[in-house]
Image: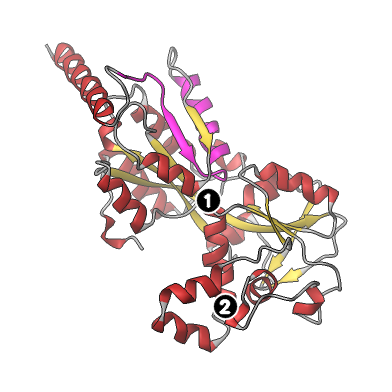
Amino acid sequence: MKTFALLAATTVSVLSLAACGDQSGGGAGQTRDQIRAVGSSTVYPFATAVAELFVQSNAGMKSPIIESTGTGGGMKLFCAGVGAQHPDIADASRRMKKAEFDMCAANGVTDIIEIQVGVDGLAFAESKQGPGLKLTPKIVYEALAANPYGKGPNKAQTWKDVDPSLPAIAISVFGPPSTSGTRDSLAELILEKGCQSDEAMKALKEKNEDEYKATCTRVREDGKYVDSGENDNLIVQKLGANPNAVGVFGYSFLEENKDTLKDVSINGVEATYETVSTGQYPGARPLYIYVKKAHMTAIPGLQGFLNAFAANWNPDGPLTKRGMVAAPEDVRKKSAEIVKALTVLDGSQLK
């Protein structure tokens, strides 16, 4: 009887999910027997690693579909609705925004599970043949801001124009697009910090939040900053061909390419496993996955996929061997409890 009841409940969940899909324009009776995740290019290699581990320990299950769309692009897809035609998981290299949470709610995505799966560093790197730059948030801001401190278009052409201690080589930075969580982290962790070195900008934040955001986070578009898409490996390749350029991407890509790249320190701190895990590194940031509770019983294996994440995110585990930095023990414990209880996110603390 228990087995029959479980099967019946699962059948109802699948039918309910299909019905949700119908309401969202997904077509009659649409169902799916394969997990689908979208989002961050930084989380992508870790999510694919978990997918491999999940399939190895769950014979007969189809491999989850993991798509690298960027955090912002992934959130749009994730929040579009509940149903088989919408993804189950959004991978994110920064926390969900309040506006995204509200967008989800407006489209019927109301029970969202937030799980921090690890930590990453927003790394700055250059070729092994590079000039050996040493940067600060203030220098990065003054080099890349479209309108530094609101005083007019950025005219700096070389790093020396920004800071006399730096070489007179052209500013050239390959980085993530506006849809990427890595770009959001660049704005929040580096550009804003540099912008706030000017007291007038702190006052502007209190007076006009929109103007402050535009002044402190909008990146110049004259070719000094090159939007390099969601494939961070392309940035690695471009640094090999441009030894005087700087690349911005997740720490794991620096770690995986130490044979061809070297770290560009920020505030004198290099991006290493230790500095990122302890938060000493200015670019340290949490990594998340977001899951629709409505899909948990309807999509086969979704709970098992979450369990696979939790079983492999410890220090010296398979994910850290892929370059992810393990979250502190208390964070891992809390995340494991969320995976088990499927606790939903209270959006009141989101920004």
The CA distance from mark 1 to mark 2 is 22 Å
Q: Find disc 2 in the rendering and name its residue.
A: 195
Residue 186 placement, left or right of 61: right
Q: Quadrant of residue 226?
A: bottom right
Residue 31 placement, left or right of 126: left
Q: Residues within 10 Å of mark 1 (few under 14, many from 20)?
A: some
| Residue extent of the magenta highlight | 30-57
Q: Secondary structure at mark 2?
A: helix
Q: Find disc 1 in the rendering and name its residue.
A: 179
Residue 122 % position (x, y): 60, 58
> N-terminal of the two: label 1 or label 2?
1
The answer to whether any part of residue 277 appears in the image is no
In the rendered image, the quadrant that contains the N terminus is top left
Q: Residues within 10 Å of mark 2 (few under 14, many from 20)?
A: many
Q: Amino acid at mark 2?
A: Cys
Q: Is residue 39 magenta?
A: yes
Residue 296 % position (x, y): 29, 30
Residue 314 % position (x, y): 49, 43
Instruction: Identify the residue at the far left of this view.
Output: 1
Q: Nearer the viewer, mark 1 or mark 2?
A: 1
Residue 317 placement, left or right of 4: right
Marks 1 and 2 close (CB-CB < 8 Å): no
Residue drawn 50% across and 51% down? 93
Q: Amino acid at mark 1?
A: Thr
Residue 135 placement, left or right of 44: right
Residue 115 % position (x, y): 38, 46
Where is 257 relative to 203, above or below?
A: above
